[in-house]
């Protein structure tokens, strides 16, 4: 039976506060009914998936513990109240692949629960917050299932929950669907729920559809299907209000509230949290999710950008940790934006609809009330584009004084002067584009740990893989990052250990995987250097000739992120051949005895590429297809061994000067559209106007700098982009840094231009093709001394 409050809740879906004046003295009065309607707040959570947290476990204890405090420790940092992790399936699921605990049916009898890092991360979260809610969701899946919606899959999820128990964890939820792909009503009701129940997991709750299907269309089914509705604990959709600044253009479905189920944004944000622009976007998105959609839980992907800068969706998260060898990490303002919610309102508090609405200039606010009888409450505000005076009538929520916390672009999470209740009303003058929390509560804290200094990855590095424990997560060597497939440490003969690729059958892919490859994680691209390693190809792959080899100057193909990577690949094949390959061509080949281990050495200096097998030079050629990139291992989906790694490289020169710097253009003098070219996110971009004319942008480096190098990443990887780079000290007089207006050369993953200039402004001009198409810019990186 539906409750009597449903009609009121549905009416509240359309409620928003009246818009005030837009001048600097604008005033707005908001009357809050302390006993009014509202749904229950479920907290702000995190989503660790797509291998985005992989490098975190490689940090030394002190820095790793400090990072985890910022994420999960209550009243210290973000204080996430919920954590959803990926259930690994050996396939690329955004930035990389996460390992399956049972990649064969036989392994279901003895699952490998030490693989990967997600159980470890959940345990660390629980150690800091025993009340945190744990959930898990599938992206890719093993191929031995008899279909996604099978008893096999239900059993697999049961085993995952068993694994959590062995780690001392108590799961609260399991996602009964395939992330952003599909869900199946009958499987959830008739297979998954009974499987959980008969295995002792009646208390595990199921949520769906995790972004599958059109927004909230599942609600139309749920209001008619009480059995299905009673099987679910929440409706979880992804990016309901917007996606990476893009308006989804969807409207609320009235039936979503009528289901009586809590509504979640099961995955949200997906931006770099370093800028204040993105920080206020995050906070406003949380507020609007409730104001517009009545969403009571918003979960952030990802809590920490702990994937290499070379990976897809790099630099995305609420903080950053990509230098485990140095212990260095970055606490971004978005951590404190989430703290404005989680440190002042707990799951189970109630939204007060009368205290939720929008402000002039693109602002918003929500009010949360503690339901334990204490009358505590908090109001979170993101102010609009102009200063404003806000008056809150709180006559039925009496308190003498309320505490105020504020964040702005220069300083985050600072307690400022209290406000006093006068005649049942408080008044707060807000500055533009700031985050405020007004609260009756105490005990909040801006946590602080000292952060080690930055340090590049060692330019000379070796690992024989013998010093790792095989009974401790993640069962992969430090600083490695699997992009596709499953590279795992195993015991060899005697005391020898080595790295072995173990995915040897097809899987249920989330995105297509064409080969297995792993990079040695670096925070800077290689310019020149060498990698050597022993390799062994054990058998043929299920889908072709087996192979094992090395990658040099490797990088993602951004258009097809899990396909064959960019870079030179030096492979030995099970049929007794070796080949030197680019993505599209064979540059050299020969014969080799594939029945034994071989030592491969592979070097690139300028356009000279050399390859050695067992100390014998077999490749010495000139090629400039690939300019920069990472080094690592590659194989087919076959057993392949790797041992005795040695790296000796020179990183790309210079210090990055252009990150997050302002840019303008005649078509956008304010510069709102250019942030994608300077945010470090490898998949965001600036799209110039394709009208057949030259287009340019100008980036301001903030001061006169020595310019040594520019890297231009475009989507024209299959043809030579035509462009020109100029520099200026005054933004008036310009000189040429690089003239590629007649360029026909393909340079992957980016065009690299060396020079020697002194400038504050850099101008990139793009020329159109004959068909008027023009390159999109993923990143324009300017380096100095």
Image (cartoon, rainbow, N blue to C red):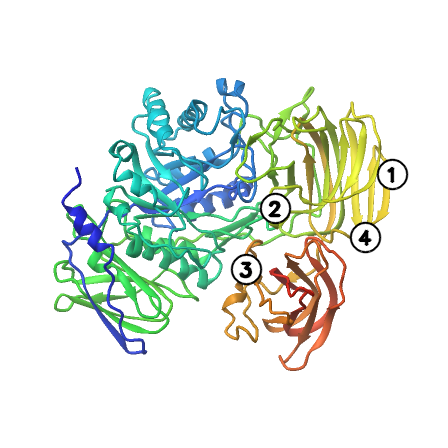
Residue under label 1: 617
> Disc 3 and disc 2: Cα gap in Å?
21 Å
> Residue 651 at x, y = what percent?
70, 53
Mark 4 Cα within 10 Å, few/some/many (few <14, many 20+)?
some
> Residue 185 at x, y = what percent?
35, 32
Q: Are marks 2 and 4 in contact (CB under 8 Å)?
A: no
Residue at 30% over, 26% down: 202
Q: Give above or below for 444 relative to 390.
A: above
Residue at 16% over, 47% down: 5
Q: What element carries label 1?
A: strand
Q: Is mark 4 on a helix, strand or loop?
A: loop
Mark 1 Cα within 10 Å, few/some/many (few <14, many 20+)?
few
Residue under label 2: 560
Residue under label 4: 607
Nearest to viewer (mark 2 / mark 1): 2
- Residue 397 figure quarter: bottom left
Mark 2 Cα within 10 Å, few/some/many (few <14, many 20+)?
few
Nearest to viewer (mark 4 / mark 1): 4
Q: Earlier in the sequence, mark 1 or mark 3?
A: 1
Residue under label 3: 679
> Residue 260 at x, y = what percent?
23, 42
Q: In this view, does 533 lie to the left or right of 301?
A: right
Q: Earlier in the sequence, mark 4 or mark 3?
A: 4
């Amino acid at each position: 039976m539906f409750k009597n409050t449903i009609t009121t809740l549905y009416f509240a879906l359309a409620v928003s506060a009246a818009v005030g004046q837009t001048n600097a003295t604008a005033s707005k009065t908001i009357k809050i009914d302390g006993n009014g309607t509202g749904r229950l707040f479920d907290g702000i959570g995190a989503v660790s998936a797509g291998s985005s947290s992989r490098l975190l476990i490689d940090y030394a204890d002190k820095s790793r513990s400090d990072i985890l405090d910022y994420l999960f420790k209550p009243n210290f940092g973000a204080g996430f109240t919920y954590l959803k992790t990926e259930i690994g399936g050996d396939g690329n699921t955004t930035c990389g692949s996460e390992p399956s605990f049972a990649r064969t049916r036989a392994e279901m009898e003895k699952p490998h629960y030490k693989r990967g890092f997600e159980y470890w991360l959940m345990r660390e979260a629980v150690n800091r917050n025993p009340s945190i809610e744990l959930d898990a969701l599938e992206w890719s899946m093993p191929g031995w299932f008899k279909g996604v919606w099978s008893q096999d899959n239900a059993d697999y999820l049961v085993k995952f929950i068993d694994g959590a128990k062995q780690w001392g964890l108590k799961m609260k939820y399991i996602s009964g669907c395939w992330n952003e792909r599909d869900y199946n009503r009958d499987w959830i009701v008739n297979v998954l729920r009974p499987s959980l129940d008969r295995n002792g997991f009646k208390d595990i709750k199921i949520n769906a559809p995790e972004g599958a299907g059109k927004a909230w269309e599942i609600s139309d089914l749920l209001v008619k299907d009480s059995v299905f509705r009673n099987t679910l604990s929440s409706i979880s959709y992804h990016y309901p209000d917007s996606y990476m600044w893009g308006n989804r253009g969807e409207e609320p479905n009235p039936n979503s509230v009528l289901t009586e189920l809590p509504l979640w944004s099961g995955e949200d944000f997906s931006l770099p949290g370093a800028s204040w622009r993105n920080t206020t976007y995050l906070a406003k998105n949380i507020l609007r999710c409730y104001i517009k959609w009545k969403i009571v839980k918003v979960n952030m992907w990802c809590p920490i950008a702990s994937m290499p800068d070379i990976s897809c969706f790099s630099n995305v998260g609420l903080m950053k940790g990509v230098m485990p060898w140095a212990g260095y990490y970055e606490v971004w303002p978005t951590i404190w934006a989430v703290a404005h919610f989680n440190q002042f309102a707990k799951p189970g508090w109630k939204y007060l609809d009368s205290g939720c609405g929008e402000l002039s200039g693109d602002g918003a606010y929500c009010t949360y009330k503690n339901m334990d009888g204490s009358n505590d409450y908090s109001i979170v505000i993101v102010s609009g584009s102009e200063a404003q005076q806000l008056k809150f009538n709180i006559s039925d929520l009496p308190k003498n004084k309320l505490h105020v916390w504020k964040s702005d672009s220069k300083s985050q999470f600072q307690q400022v002067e209290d406000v006093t209740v006068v005649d049942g009303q408080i008044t707060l003058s807000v500055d533009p584009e700031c985050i405020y929390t007004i609260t009756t509560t105490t005990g909040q804290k801006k946590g602080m740990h000292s952060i080690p200094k930055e340090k590049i990855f060692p330019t000379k590095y070796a690992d024989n893989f013998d010093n790792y424990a095989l009974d401790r997560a993640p069962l992969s060597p430090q600083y490695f990052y699997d992009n596709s497939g499953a590279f795992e440490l195993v015991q060899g003969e005697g005391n020898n250990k080595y790295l072995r690729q173990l995915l040897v059958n097809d899987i249920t892919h989330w995105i297509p995987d064409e080969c297995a490859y792993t990079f040695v994680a670096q925070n800077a691209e290689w310019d020149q250097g060498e990698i050597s390693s022993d390799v062994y190809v054990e058998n043929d792959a299920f889908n072709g000739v087996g192979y094992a080899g090395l990658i040099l100057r490797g990088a993602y193909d951004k258009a097809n992120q899990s396909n064959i990577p960019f870079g030179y690949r030096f492979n030995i094949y099970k049929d007794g051949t070796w080949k030197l390959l680019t993505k599209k061509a064979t540059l050299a080949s020969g014969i080799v005895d594939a029945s034994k281990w071989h030592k491969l050495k592979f070097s690139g200096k300028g356009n000279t590429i050399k390859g050695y097998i067992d100390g014998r030079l077999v490749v010495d050629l000139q090629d400039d297809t690939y300019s920069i990139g990472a080094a690592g291992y590659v194989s087919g989906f076959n057993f392949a061994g790797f041992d005795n790694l040695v790296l000796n490289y020179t990183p790309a020169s210079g210090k990055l000067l252009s990150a997050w710097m302002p840019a303008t253009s005649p078509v956008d003098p304010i510069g709102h559209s250019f942030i994608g070219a300077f945010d470090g996110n490898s998949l965001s971009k600036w799209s110039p106007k394709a009208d057949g004319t030259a287009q340019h942008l100008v980036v301001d480096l903030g001061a006169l700098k020595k310019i040594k190098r520019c890297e231009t990443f475009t989507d024209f990887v299959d043809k030579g982009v035509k462009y020109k780079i100029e520099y200026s000290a005054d933004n008036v007089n310009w000189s040429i840094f690089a003239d590629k207006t007649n360029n026909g050369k393909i340079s992957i993953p980016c065009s690299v231009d060396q020079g020697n200039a002194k400038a504050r402004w850099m101008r990139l001009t793009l020329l159109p093709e004959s068909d008027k198409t023009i390159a999109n810019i993923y990143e324009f990186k300017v380096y100095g001394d």
